[in-house]
Amino acid sequence: MDNKEEKYRVPSLEKGLSILDCLSRNNKGMTLQEIKEELELSQTTAYRIMNTMMRLEFLTYDERSRCYKLSLKLLTLGFRALNEHQLIETVLPHLQTLRDQVRETVCFGVMGEEKGVFINQAQGSYPFSFTLAPGKSFELHCSAPGKAIMAYLPNSVREKYLLNMDFQRFNERTITSREDYMKELRKILRLGYAIDNEEELTGVICIASPVFDYRGYPCGSIWISGPKGRLTKEVIENNAVLIKEEAKLISAELGYMQTKK
């Protein structure tokens, strides 16, 4: 490194980025001791940097394992950076394929810091179909994609979202308690898909299934939205099969290898 490059170095920033890079290669997290030894940092330096990143919500800390992990804030930033790149390029053809099968609008969304974030859609072919604006948020307790992702999140990550949920009531069908919500998530795990049965908007039904990345992490969800009159019980069951299958294909393209239980 020449003198000019050395002059503009920010050692603390370099160390902080090294910590993020190190944690990105250790999905189960790392202790302070492991990180300082891996990167040859003093304990004081490592602790100060990691404490700062925790305060800024770039890291999370598990009291039981004493491990630090990358937070969902980084995931959100990553999706912003991806924009029209790999993830969207992978998902969009599948949204269009599914739309051609079910004719309803098919959407894709991911988790944000407190709510879900809508990313892209394939517009339905019916004369009347739903349209969303990219970046629009969706609730986690009453939306199909929110529930589909929440059901498959690691417990520690799910708990973080649960702590921020107020279970706002939109109508008499909205889930408004943690107990009922957890029961719903267990049902979703059995079925492999989630339903918003008019829980936010009266007359609107959504069906969603999670999408997994190469780590097996639920990185998003695909779903359809349509009016109650078109989405009868039989249609919902048939469409759920198609949605699950398309979500599996997307996940496979993202590198996910499902293990048999």
Image (cartoon, grey):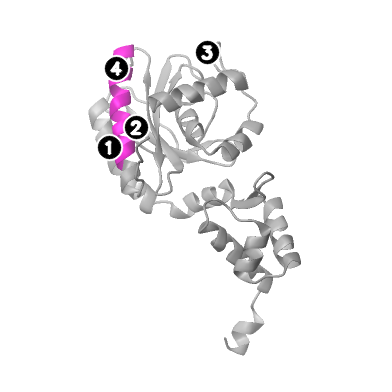
Indicate which disc residue 106 carries.
2
Identify whether 54 is placed above or below 158.
below
Indicate which disc residue 1 carries.
none
Precedes in sequence: disc 4 or disc 1: 1
Between circles 4 and 2, the one closer to the viewer is 4
Residue that numbered label 4 is attached to: 235
- Kind of residue indicated by mark 3: Arg
User: In the drawing, does residue 209 fall left or right of residue 114?
Assistant: left
Residue numbers of the magenta segment: 233-249
Precedes in sequence: disc 4 or disc 2: 2
The answer for how far apart the CA atoms under marks 3 and 2 are is 23 Å
Identify whether 45 is placed above or below 60.
below
Q: Quadrant of the C terminus?
A: top left
Quarter residue 93 falls in? top left
User: Secondary structure under badge 2?
Assistant: strand
User: Secondary structure under badge 4?
Assistant: helix
User: Where does residue 40 sit, x and y in percent of width and height?
Assistant: 64, 72
Q: Residue at horizontal 59%, vertical 42%?
A: 113
User: Secondary structure under badge 3?
Assistant: loop
| Residue 240 within the magenta-colored segment of the rendering | yes
Residue that numbered label 3 is attached to: 173
Q: Are marks 2 and 1 in contact (CB under 8 Å)?
A: yes
User: Where does residue 189 sit, x and y in percent of width and height?
Assistant: 44, 27
